[in-house]
Image (cartoon, helix red, strand yellow):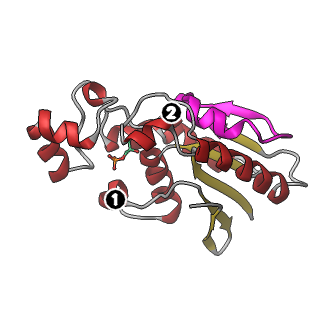
Amino acid sequence: PRPILLTRHGESMDNVRGRIGGDTELSEAGGVYSKKLANFVEKRLKSERAASIWTSTLQRTILTASPIGGFPKIQWRALDEIYAGVCDGMTYEEIKKNMPEEYQARKKDKLRYRYPRGESYLDVIQRLEPVIIELERQRAPVVVISHQAVLRALYAYFADRPLKEIPHIEVPLHTIIEIQMGVTGVQEKRYKLMD
Ligand code: G3H
């Protein structure tokens, strides 16, 4: 069995401000997480020569990966966060106030709701297909550093969770979800490195 480690980026400045999307840097806590993650990964994958680190193309995942030494890093656009289109950079409060119909429509069907000029969860699930194929092909461990919506979809795939649950799965910050693919099925461990 070989592990796949899933984690969100360290806390970003937009996380602190409650803004969705964007491409900001890490907060101080996010920076601390990046170092703790590096420590964890370097120990956990010490003798795994062929392991690799996959990030999105957004700063917050690249910065989270940056302290990790000794493994190749690959950027995937398909691992970028769900794109909120015209709502990118807004807070949920602002969306509720300025675009109440959009807010309600999303609340009603979060899986299928597509942001104007943006994406739905179904869109994200679809664009993840090549990533999943490549993850399945790998024989060595992979560390995936991505975003909440994307990791919900990836996690659901490996944990065999139904489609309709995907937008509501909890993927907390600063926590590593380790998935082990064995002959008897999938095993999962969680490591909360900080609050
Ligand atoms: O910025 C986007 C969030 O990570 C996605 O969360 O789909 O629950 O709004 P949400």
Magenta segment range? Answer: 54-78
The numbered mark at residue 78 is 2
Q: Can residue 118 be seen?
A: no
Give left or right: position of 150 versus 10: left
Residue at image x 35%, y 37%?
123
Q: Nearer the viewer, residue 50 or 43?
A: 43
Q: Nearer the viewer, mark 1 or mark 2?
A: 1
The numbered mark at residue 168 is 1
Judge whether 63 appears above or below 185 on screen. Answer: above
Are there few (<14), some (14-19), or many (20+) residues within 10 Å of tag 2?
many
Q: Secondary structure at mark 1?
A: helix
Q: Inspect the image, locate mark 1, and give the three-letter code of the amino acid beneath it.
A: His
Q: Inspect the image, locate mark 2, and give the three-letter code of the amino acid beneath it.
A: Ala
Give left or right: position of 33 versus 91: right
Q: Quadrant of ligand 1?
A: top left
Q: Earlier in the sequence, mark 1 or mark 2?
A: 2
Residue at image x 63%, y 50%?
136
Q: Is residue 63 magenta?
A: yes
**Separation of disc 1 and disc 2 at Cα?**
20 Å
Give left or right: position of 181 versus 106: right
Q: Is residue 48 magenta?
A: no
Give left or right: position of 36 versus 136: right
Callout 1: CB less than 8 Å from ligand 1: yes
Rendering quarter of residue 75: top right
Q: Secondary structure at mark 2?
A: helix
